[in-house]
Amino acid sequence: MGMRAPDEGMCWYHGPNPQDVFSDAETGVALVSVRYESGPCMCESPVYREIIRIDAETLAEIEVRAQLTSPED
């Protein structure tokens, strides 16, 4: 099913697009930020945040990816 054009003056959203993941290995908790890009240009792009529990394997993968994308010292 394709996205239809919004009615005149109405907002519409693409999404979701994960933005950030902040995790704590000790507690197994992560804060996830997800943005929904919007259109037309006068509409805000909402960001939603949710706290979730994740398993140790997923936390380890988050840490590996964070190290790969962080600038070297």
Image (tube, rainbow, N blue to C red):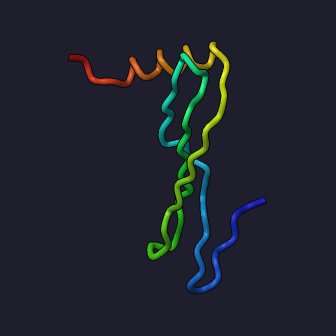
Q: Position of residue 1 (x, y in %)?
A: 78, 59
Q: Which residue does the image show at 27% across and 23% down from the upper left? A: 71
The residue under the point 60% across, 63% down is 13
Front-lying residue, 35 or 6: 35
Whether residue 11 is situated above or below residue 45 in the rendered picture? below
Q: Residue furthest bottom?
A: 8
Query: How far across and how far down the image is residue 14, in percent?
Result: 60, 58
Q: Position of residue 33 (x, y in %)?
A: 53, 44
Residue lying farthest to the left in this orientation = 73
Tell me: 72 left or right of 29. Answer: left
Q: Quadrant of residue 52?
A: top right
Q: How many marks?
A: 0
Name the outermost residue toward the right. Answer: 1
| Residue 13 left/right relative to 43 | right
Quarter in which the C terminus is drawn: top left
Residue 8, percent across and down?
59, 86
Question: Residue sitting at 55 percent across and 14 percent down?
Answer: 60
At horizontal 47% and vertical 15% (from top left) the residue drawn is 64
